[in-house]
């Protein structure tokens, strides 16, 4: 999904420094010996598969890994061209169709394994916008199947200059070796992918921690706070641990599976990058796999985030916010914050919104849209209120919903809203005629 | 041809309710469908979210959701011999101008027509004798059956209600009459998808009053739905908030049945569906033999012409434009009132209406609690629900006490008679009467006549140089008698309810005028029927003249019921689409032998 590329881009600076400073190549980081199981003679353009089961399984791996999210962007299926703006320039997603000239048609299966699992592509090191850090966990079987599937993709001629828009020295692919040395755990899945199917999906193809784990100052995932929530692209990816106040504590595996496959568990509704992930990837999970993910997540140890006592609503600001809520929000979110099941998120009982308010501010300023799924077709939109509300009004309303109907959370500060308004380029509140 | 697009199985001309319903049915059946819509894309959360939707000045006063008059209008005259002049303001009918069409800005009243409405000619003869029918025909009425019965329509009505989420209470479940519902309705297989809306103060008063008078009041079936609902396409709708900004407005909270709220979310994701927005179809293009068409000629917003080839052309634009497109395409023969030959433009009708306003001293009607379809109605004097043996007309009217809106600009003339309409006296009166006024509306049937019809205007043209449509229409004697009768009943009810200072506006008292109508229900001109000499379309909405052209809209109604048209349009769209994908596609040709 889009957000992970932002992460990758965000750590490029670190990567360049690391590459320049380390001076030593870590064998382990670049070791591709696991790719030896793959053929190195037939290219993707030449390869054809008669194994319909393998192709179908490979398509499923593609869905679980959400490849199309970045590589299908208007130029044809998997033909690349998705531009990712970064502080260091623009990255463009590659053409991964079997086209020889402009795609990956000249790759052998071994080249393909090296790229997907080890970040070593045909033109040099991949940028970590490509989540090979998680795909490293994919089994040989899933990789073989994915290869079979990719051979069925129609070749599209669409030349891409992936890093031509990056400034020096960030346009030097070799620099990524340094990043890998620091942050890339170049190892396969450390358990049984059959019996630990949930963890395999979460840490492998699903690459959940890319967004849901917080990152340290150098932009790398903090293993110590695994899946405890993170902020990506101005959206908050919630705590997925069993924390009963802000996490999935109390959620059943069935409810989580429902969320993954339909975009809603009946309380919250996916938005932002998660809506994309549900729409393009997670809705295609089998119920069995979605339940496996749910079971795994419900097995996680709770983070130690403590509950926040509800702020008083008996203030002039909160009374004003109550009026603003009724006028602007209640039509869809309900007078009791109940939302509309499966379509509009509830506030009552919605624990995912009690932590970092980034996503809520984002939605207020730029609007949001639920995913479209086979089960839930609506994909309802949340309108932007940037034109109508000041930073203080947005902050007040969010504080109000975060502390009403049994909720308790810190107040949202108008400065947070102002900052995000600037970062997102959201418009200012419309000017009132002066008297 | 230049700018020829890849061929489609079906091209849909106009993506309003009829076009959306048909596109949904046809794409689900696996056909490749291209819809061409003159207006722009319009989306709930982007274009009319709750914070934008109640902008009365923008949407209601300035009609921003309607097609600008500069794009197309109609010309009008009351009778043959007069020179028609262009209509300069949308009042009597309202062309849609967006994906969703008029289905985006309608009010939401969701009626099935009565069984009688489909068979006016036959049932009049059966109940009152052939002589009665003959005498009406001799007078100039052009009564004819639809070629389809209510019984045949019931499953399609049911399907459309399920898609639209219609709120209501059944009054006739498989023949069993149920008090509280409309006991006069045709039998329905099951209840409405969502329960009826709640009563306002005025609705409660109206219900109690009419019940006390021995009538059968019921809550109007509504496309402002009473609770959240998931339709058969998997699309969720939200509960109505009774905001009262419905007709002329979009709906911000997914509560008003519309293509946006009910169909487009599912349809837009189908890979075998394409919509070309801001693209206007100029006309269909016939094959050399004239028996079928090969596609439609269109022009984009930027003025580039193109051609969309298709095996089937569905004309599902606004009622007026359906007729106009057939005439511009040279399909069928223009109706001529002198010879009564030709079928295109024939049987134009409107909706015969009146209103009775009363004032209730000290009342708190709270009109800001409203809904486009919010009201209580009696059907005791609608259709042929009452004996016409000793009356000098056929047909009737639904008589409703309504709470459709409390829009402050629109209602500012709703003050007691005798008060000044300006200055401080007006302000004082409006502040008081806003809460004390209540309205009854009679929505009556309209019967077609020989002299009312649509044709191409000889003088006025649109921006592309194509002739505008000309409307020739006035109220007829039968309908005037009918609405006089219904209005008297409404006055009795208003007085019984305690209303004072009554104001009565009987629309049919003066010649029909496009600027002062209470309705917007314009029908006919391209009517369905089983006789190709009196109908343009067969009972499957297929052109008698070009068998791969189908057309759905209120244009297909041979006469108007005492109801809003939308549910019948939606049901006909389901019927036509199923005829196409179940029968026509596999065996192209006339579905009914002429």
Image (tube, grey):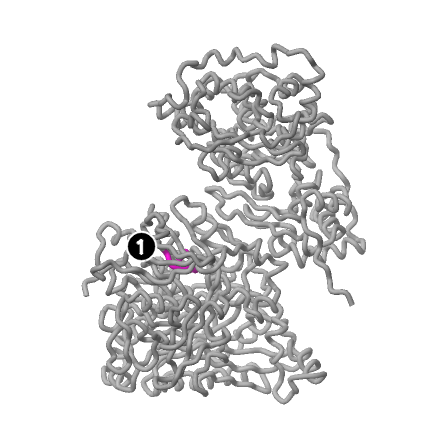
**In this orientation, does residue A241 appear?**
no
Please tell me whether residue B13 belongs to the stretch shown in magenta. yes
Count the marks.
1
Mark 1 secondary-structure assignment: helix
Q: Classify residue A133 as left or right of residue B582.
A: right
The residue that appears at 58% across and 15% down in the rendered structure is: A187
Picture coordinates of residue A337, whole percent (x, y): 65, 50
Q: Residues within 10 Å of mark 1 (few under 14, many from 20)?
A: some
Residue occupying the far bottom of the picture: B418
Please tell me whether residue A267 belongs to the stretch shown in magenta. no
Residue occupying the far right of the picture: A315
The residue that appears at 62% across and 60% down in the rendered structure is: B52
**In this orientation, does residue B371 appear?**
yes
Residue B459 image-quadrant placement: bottom left
Q: Which one is nearer the viewer's eye here, B113 or A31?
A: A31
Residue A326 image-quadrant placement: bottom right
Q: Is residue B477 above or below residue A359?
A: below
Q: Which one is nearer the viewer's eye here, B240 or A85?
A: A85
The residue that appears at 56% across and 45% down in the rendered structure is: A370
Residues shaded magenta: B12-20
Q: Is residue A424 above or below residue B362?
A: above
Picture coordinates of residue A90, whole percent (x, y): 61, 34
Q: Is residue A183 above or below residue A76?
A: above
Picture coordinates of residue B354, whole percent (x, y): 48, 81
Residue occupying the far left of the picture: B593
Picture coordinates of residue B534, whole percent (x, y): 25, 73
Chain for numbered disc 1: B
In which quadrant will I find the C terminus of chain B?
bottom left
Q: Which one is nearer the viewer's eye here, A157 or A398?
A: A157
Q: Classify residue B3 as left or right of residue A318.
A: left
- The residue identified by callout 1 is B578
The residue that appears at 49% across and 66% down in the rendered structure is: B67
């Amino acid at each position: 999904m889009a957000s992970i590329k932002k992460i990758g881009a965000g750590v490029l600076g670190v990567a360049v420094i690391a590459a320049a400073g380390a001076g030593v190549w870590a064998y382990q980081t670049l070791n591709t010996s696991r790719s030896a199981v793959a053929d190195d003679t037939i290219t993707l353009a030449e390869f054809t598969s008669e194994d319909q089961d393998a192709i179908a399984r490979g398509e499923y791996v593609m869905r679980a890994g959400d490849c199309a999210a970045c590589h299908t962007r208007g130029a044809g299926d998997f033909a690349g061209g998705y531009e990712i703006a970064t502080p260091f320039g623009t990255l463009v997603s590659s053409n991964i169709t079997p086209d020889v000239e402009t795609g990956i048609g000249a790759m052998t299966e071994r080249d393909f394994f090296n790229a997907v699992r080890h970040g070593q592509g045909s033109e040099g090191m991949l940028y970590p916008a490509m989540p090979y850090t998680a795909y490293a966990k994919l089994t040989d079987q899933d990789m073989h199947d994915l290869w079979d599937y990719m051979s069925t993709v129609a070749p599209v001629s669409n030349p891409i200059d992936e890093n031509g828009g990056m400034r020096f020295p960030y346009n030097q692919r070799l620099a990524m070796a340094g990043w890998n040395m620091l942050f890339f755990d170049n190892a396969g899945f450390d358990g049984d992918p059959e019996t630990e199917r949930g963890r395999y999906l979460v840490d492998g193809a699903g690459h959940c921690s890319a967004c849901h784990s917080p990152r340290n100052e150098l932009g790398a995932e903090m293993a110590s706070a695994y899946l405890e929530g993170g902020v990506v692209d101005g959206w908050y990816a919630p705590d997925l641990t069993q924390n009963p106040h802000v996490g999935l504590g109390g959620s059943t595996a069935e409810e989580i599976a429902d969320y993954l496959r339909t975009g809603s568990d009946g309380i919250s509704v996916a938005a932002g990058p998660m809506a994309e992930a549900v729409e393009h990837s997670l809705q295609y999970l089998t119920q069995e796999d979605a339940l496996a993910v749910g079971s795994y997540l419900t097995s996680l140890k709770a983070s130690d985030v403590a509950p926040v006592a509800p702020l008083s609503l008996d203030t002039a600001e909160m009374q004003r916010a109550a009026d603003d809520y009724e006028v602007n929000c209640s039509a869809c979110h309900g007078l009791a914050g109940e939302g509309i099941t499966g379509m509009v998120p509830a506030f009552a009982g919605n624990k995912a919104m009690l932590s970092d308010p980034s996503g809520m501010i984002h939605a207020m300023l730029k609007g949001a849209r639920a995913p479209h799924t086979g089960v839930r077709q609506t994909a309802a939109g949340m309108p932007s209120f940037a034109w109508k509300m000041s930073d203080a009004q947005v902050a007040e309303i969010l504080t109000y919903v975060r502390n009403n109907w049994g909720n308790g959370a810190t107040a949202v500060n108008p400065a947070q809203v102002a900052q995000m308004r600037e970062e997102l380029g959201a418009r200012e509140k419309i000017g009132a005629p002066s008297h | 041809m230049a700018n020829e697009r890849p061929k489609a199985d079906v091209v849909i001309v106009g993506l309003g309710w009829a076009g959306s319903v048909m596109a949904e049915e046809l794409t689900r059946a696996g056909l490749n469908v291209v819809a061409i819509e003159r207006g722009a894309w319009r989306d709930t959360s982007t274009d009319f979210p709750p914070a934008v939707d109640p902008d009365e000045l923008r949407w209601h006063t300035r009609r921003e959701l309607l097609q600008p008059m500069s794009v197309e209008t109609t010309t009008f005259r009351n009778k043959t011999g007069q020179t028609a002049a262009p209509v300069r303001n949308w009042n009597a009918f309202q062309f849609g101008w967006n994906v969703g069409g008029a289905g985006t800005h309608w009010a939401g009243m969701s009626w099935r027509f009565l069984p009688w409405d489909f068979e006016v000619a036959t049932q009049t003869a059966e109940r009152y004798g052939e002589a009665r029918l003959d005498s009406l025909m001799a007078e100039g009425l052009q009564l004819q059956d639809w070629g389809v019965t209510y019984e045949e329509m019931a499953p399609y009505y049911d399907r459309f209600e399920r898609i639209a989420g219609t709120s209501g209470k059944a009054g006739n479940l498989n023949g069993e009459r149920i008090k509280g519902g409309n006991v006069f309705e045709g039998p329905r297989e099951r209840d409405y998808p969502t329960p009826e809306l709640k009563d306002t103060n005025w609705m409660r008063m109206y219900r109690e009053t009419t019940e006390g008078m021995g009538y059968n009041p019921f809550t109007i079936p509504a496309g402002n739905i009473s609770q959240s609902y998931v339709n058969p396409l998997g699309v969720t709708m939200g509960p109505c908030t009774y905001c009262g900004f419905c007709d002329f407005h979009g709906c911000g909270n997914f509560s008003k049945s519309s293509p946006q709220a009910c169909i487009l979310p599912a349809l837009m994701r189908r890979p075998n569906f394409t919509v070309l927005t801001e693209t206007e179809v100029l006309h269909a293009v016939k094959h050399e033999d004239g028996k079928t068409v090969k596609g439609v000629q269109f022009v984009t917003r930027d003025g580039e012409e193109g051609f969309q080839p298709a095996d089937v052309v569905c004309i599902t634009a606004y009622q007026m434009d359906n007729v106009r497109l057939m005439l511009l395409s040279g399909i069928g023969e223009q109706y001529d009132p002198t010879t009564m030959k030709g079928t295109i433009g024939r049987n134009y009708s409107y909706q015969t209406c009146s209103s009775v306003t009363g004032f209730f001293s000290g009342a708190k009607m709270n009109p800001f609690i409203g809904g486009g379809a919010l009201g209580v109605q009696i059907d005791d004097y609608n259709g042929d629900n009452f004996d016409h043996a000793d009356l000098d007309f056929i047909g009737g009217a639904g008589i409703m006490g309504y709470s459709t809106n409390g829009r402050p600009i629109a209602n500012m003339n709703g003050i007691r008679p005798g008060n000044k309409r300006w200055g401080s006296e007006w302000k004082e009166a409006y502040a008081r009467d806003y809460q004390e006024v209540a309205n009854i509306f009679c929505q009556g049937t309209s019967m077609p006549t020989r002299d009312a019809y649509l044709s191409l205007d000889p003088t006025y043209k649109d921006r592309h140089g194509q002739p505008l449509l000309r409307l020739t229409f006035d109220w007829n004697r039968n309908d005037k008698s009918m609405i006089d009768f219904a209005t008297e009943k409404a006055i009795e009810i208003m007085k019984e309810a305690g209303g004072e200072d009554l104001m009565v506006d009987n629309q049919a008292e003066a010649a029909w005028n496009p600027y002062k109508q209470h309705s917007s229900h314009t029908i006919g001109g391209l009517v369905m029927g089983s006789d190709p000499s009196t109908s343009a379309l067969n009972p499957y909405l297929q052109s008698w003249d070009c068998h791969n052209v189908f057309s759905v809209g209120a244009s297909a109604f041979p006469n108007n019921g005492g109801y809003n048209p939308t549910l019948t349009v939606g049901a006909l769209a389901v019927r036509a689409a199923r005829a196409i994908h179940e029968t026509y596609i596999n065996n192209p040709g006339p579905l009914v032998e002429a």
